[in-house]
Amino acid sequence: MTPAARPRDVPGRLELQADACAHMGAPFYGTLLRSAAENHRAGGVVRDFFEARAPLGELSMIGVRFMGALHYRALAGAAPQLAAHFPSCGGDGNAEAAWRAACSVLRADADEIAAGVRVTPQTNEVARATPLLGGVLAVTAATGMPVRLFDVGSSAGLNARLDCYAYEGDGWRWGDPGSPLALRDQTLSGRPNHLDAALHVLERAACDLHPLDVANGADRLVLRSYVWADQLDRFRRLDRAIEACARAPLTVQAADMLAWVPQRARPVSGAATIVMHSVVLDHLAPNQRLSFAEVVRDAGARATPDAPFAWLRMEMEGAGTFATRVTLWPGEREMPIAESDGHGQKIVWRSGE
């Protein structure tokens, strides 16, 4: 893996994302991002683009933003020269030709691409619902209560509807077999615990600073633009998840999670309250992460045996490894659930917890 890049080291950060894409089965994007980094170092159009708009290079997740902006133009029909090579648009998957087209688009449509880079990334990968389900079932088994789900940094709220999907693994199944979406995990070892726990979602809510509505065509296009263009299975999952979401209508509220959690996710008698998130902390500054942890622990301190509270999160713990964990109050009990990649695949389930 490329060593960690400094915040203003644009080519270094593009290379980090290139490595992540190559590692997670998106070689087309890996090539494009590495070409962008090389172009920047050589003083090409990529450096011109970022130097003319210096604040862009200081944004978080710059590689995800850059590719999302290009992909959006291709999907929207505004860059047919890109679409001709992007597999998501029916293109030929020729990464070298796609990079030449990207340079042309960057010169001609720099302002539009810059506007796209400023958009907060919305990578609402629904396969993350599999390890998250393991966490929700662990809380259900530990408390014997119905649950209240509060998903923060929720984007369009796909994972807040995790009980609306079917799940299949090696020798196990869970959920409604008639669901439009069946998540077939790529387990490396183990299986989820507590598959027989009776899950009943009593209440669900979600928030995001920039929420998307799956019923809105423009918002669906934004969601699709952040799916890596050479991972067509992820596009199919997204489309089927959107269909399944009709079974559990949900309006994702526009709110800062630091204020929203204390207002909405207080422990209540007779239900297990769960605050959950997946791949959200990378988008926060270090001080924001600490503040959020304090907010969650304050809520946990108010839990009682009749009103338990859980913190369920799937976040990065080491290069390329994402851990799903639960902290349950009262008692602040820690329950490791699984490790996986960032898209909820290559799962190692933790047994005996």
Image (spheres, helix red, strand yellow):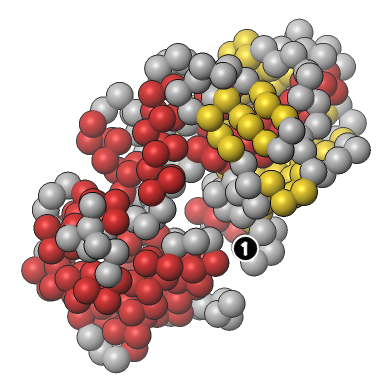
Q: Residue furthest front?
A: 171
The quadrant in which residue 97 appears is bottom left
Residue 308 makes an appearance in the image: no
Label 1 is placed on what type of residue?
Answer: Gly
> Quadrant of the image for the N terminus?
bottom right
Q: Residue at x 44, y 29 (%)?
A: 241
The quadrant in which residue 151 appears is top right
Q: Is residue 58 left or right of residue 126?
A: left
Q: Is residue 255 left or right of residue 52?
A: right
Category of crowding for the residue at label 1, using alpha-carbon neighbours closer than 10 angstroms: few (below 14), some (14–19), many (at least 20): some
Q: Residue furthest bottom?
A: 42
Above or below, comparing residue 16 to residue 86 in the picture: below
Q: Residue at x 29, y 64 (%)?
A: 93
Percent across and percent down for residue 279 are: 56, 48
> Quadrant of the image for the C terminus?
top right
Q: Residue furthest left?
A: 108
Residue 238 makes an appearance in the image: yes
Percent across and percent down for residue 2 are: 55, 80
User: Closer to the camera, 8 or 279?
Assistant: 279
Number of marks? 1
Q: Residue at x 39, y 39 (%)?
A: 236
Percent across and percent down for residue 13 are: 45, 73
Could you tell me which secondary element the residue under label 1 belongs to?
loop
Q: Is residue 276 left or right of residue 331?
A: left
The quadrant in which residue 40 appears is bottom left
Above or below, comparing residue 61 to residue 240 in the picture: below
Above or below, comparing residue 92 to residue 244 in the picture: below
Q: Residue at x 43, y 68 (%)?
A: 27
Q: Label 1 belongs to which residue?
A: 320
